[in-house]
Image (spheres, rainbow, N blue to C red):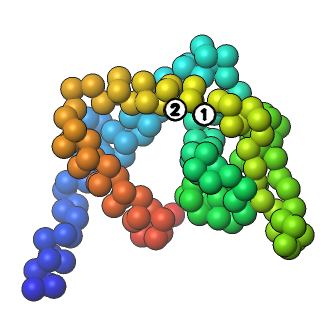
């Protein structure tokens, strides 16, 4: 039974191949084009709203802090799905842009906690409105069930990437 399921779940190499040189059939091309297009639309939206200092790359960290402010750097990185080495530069930029501040943990001064600034907290509704509006446009014509399936599939792909099943 487990062997049958494993065979059923195995990736068909032809389904992911880009060998026929048709970008519209290459999963990598499709994923990156959607990501680049949505990112560009969000950047435009942030600029038009007067918050051009917000970058789409900040969203995972901002959403995590809007949910629970004052996270340890390591916990914020885990929630945002980022490596510690990536978090350092990202937090430097977010701090420079006035969105977060690092503070020592009173219980353990070796540990830094990340807190939203007044600006970081204040922009929440504007940012969420822009992200939601962008996604409504990007996903126009896609049904709710399809969106749920898309999210489920993307989470599976993300697990594969995080588990370093991708050789690099």
Q: x, y (%) of residue 114?
A: 76, 54
> Which numbered marker is on residue 124?
1
The crowding category of the residue bearing disc 2, from other C-alpha atoms within 10 Å (few below 14, some 14 to 19, many at least 20), is few
Q: Residue at x 60, y 22 (%)?
A: 46
Q: Is residue 43 left or right of residue 27?
A: right
Q: Nearer the viewer, residue 5 or 149?
A: 149
Q: Residue at x 84, y 65 (%)?
A: 105
Q: Residue at x 25, y 35 (%)?
A: 24
Q: Measuring from the top left, give residue 100's x and y in whole percent.
A: 76, 43
Above or below, 111 relative to 29:
below
Pointer 1 with pointer 2, Cβ within 8 A: yes
The N terminus lies in which quarter of the figure? bottom left
- Provide the secondary structure element on which disc 2 rests: helix
Tell me where residue 47 appears, x and y as whole percent: 63, 18
Reading the image, the residue beneath label 2 is 128
Q: Residues within 10 Å of mark 1 (few under 14, many from 20)?
A: few
Picture quarter containing residue 6? bottom left
């Amino acid at each position: 039974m487990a062997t049958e399921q494993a065979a059923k779940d195995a990736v068909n190499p032809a389904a992911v191949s880009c060998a026929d040189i048709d970008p519209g059939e290459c999963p990598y091309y499709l994923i990156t084009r959607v990501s680049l297009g949505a990112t560009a639309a969000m950047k435009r939206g942030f600029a038009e709203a007067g918050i051009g200092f917000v970058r789409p790359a900040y969203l995972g960290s901002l959403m995590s802090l809007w949910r629970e402010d004052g996270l340890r750097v390591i916990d914020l990185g885990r929630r945002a799905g980022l490596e510690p080495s990536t978090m350092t530069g990202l937090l430097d930029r977010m701090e420079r842009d006035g969105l977060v501040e690092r503070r020592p943990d009173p219980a353990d001064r070796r540990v830094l906690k990340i807190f939203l600034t007044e600006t970081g907290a204040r922009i929440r509704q504007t940012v969420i409105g822009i992200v939601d509006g962008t996604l409504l446009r990007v996903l126009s014509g896609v049904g709710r069930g399809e969106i749920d399936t898309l999210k489920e599939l993307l989470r599976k792909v993300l697990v594969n990437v995080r588990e370093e099943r991708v050789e690099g």
